[in-house]
Amino acid sequence: MNAVTELDLRQPEIYRHWTDDLVRFADLDRLNHVNNVAFATYSESGRVDFLEHLWPGCTDGSGIGWVIAEFKLKYLAAGHYPNPVRIGTRVLHVGNSSVVLGQGLFIGDNCFATAESVLVWADTRQQRSLPMDEALKQQLQLHL
């Protein structure tokens, strides 16, 4: 995946949208570190919160909305229980039927992972991509 940006996703000041989550005991592996599945779950929480904030109902899977096409995660440090997690989410690129989101996962001031996601605007019943409404594109571009 190639984000069309030189942004450092580890820097909290690049995010305007934040989602709060928690490291749960169930998120730990045998070494008492946050496991890889939990990293993806935190990312999903931030991604869905961000998209629903911009376009309510767009992730409910009932027709037209977002489908994830690609997900890339960089592990930067171990996460530990118990801790609050803050997920920063922003837009990296807006296409005709897709968007690239960038995220930083933080415990305190420490960024312990970054993620990039490609999402496609689609008709989930017909299983095909669709061009985004101009109003949706404009909402996303406000977060570039």
Image (cartoon, helix red, strand yellow):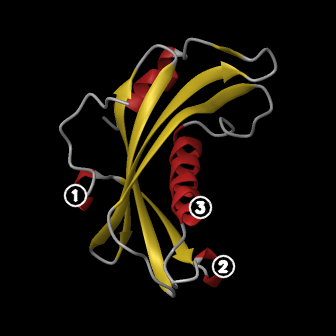
Three-letter residue code for mark 3:
Val
Quadrant for residue 3, please give it. Answer: top left
Q: Furthest-front residue in view?
A: 30
Q: Residue at x 63, y 31 (%)?
A: 67
Residue at horizontal 66 percent and vertical 28 percent from the top:
65
User: Is 75 displayed left or right of 19 in the figure?
Assistant: left
Q: Is residue 11 left or right of residue 85?
A: left
* In contact (CB < 8 Å): disc 2 and disc 3: no
Which label was assigned to residue 26? 2
Other-residue count near label 3 (Cα within 10 Å), few / some / many at <14 / 14–19 / ≥20: few
Disc number lying in front (3 or 1): 3
Is the N terminus in the top left, top right, bottom left or bottom right quadrant?
Answer: top left
Residue at coordinates 35% horizontally, 28% vertically from top-left? 93
Decide if residue 106 is on the left or right side of residue 20.
Answer: left
Q: Amino acid at mark 2?
A: Ala
* Viewer-proximal residue among 41 and 77: 77
Marks 3 & 1, CB-CB < 8 Å contact: no
Mark 2, residues whose alpha carbon is within 10 Å: few (<14), some, or many (≥20)?
few
Q: Amino acid at mark 1?
A: Glu
Q: Earlier in the sequence, mark 3 or mark 1?
A: 1
When the figure is inspected, residue 15 is found, relative to residue 90, above or below; the finding is below
Q: Which residue is mark 1?
A: 13
Q: Earlier in the sequence, mark 2 or mark 3?
A: 2
- What residue appears at the point 49 percent right and 79 percent down from the top-left corner? 33
> Residue 90: percent from the left, percent from the top?
37, 44
Q: Is residue 64 left or right of residue 53?
A: right
* Badge 2 element: helix
Q: Residues within 10 Å of mark 1 (few under 14, many from 20)?
A: few
| Quadrant in which the C terminus is drawn | top left
- Residue 124 figure quarter: top right
Query: Which residue is under mark 3?
Result: 37
Distance of mark 2 from mark 3, alpha carbons?
11 Å
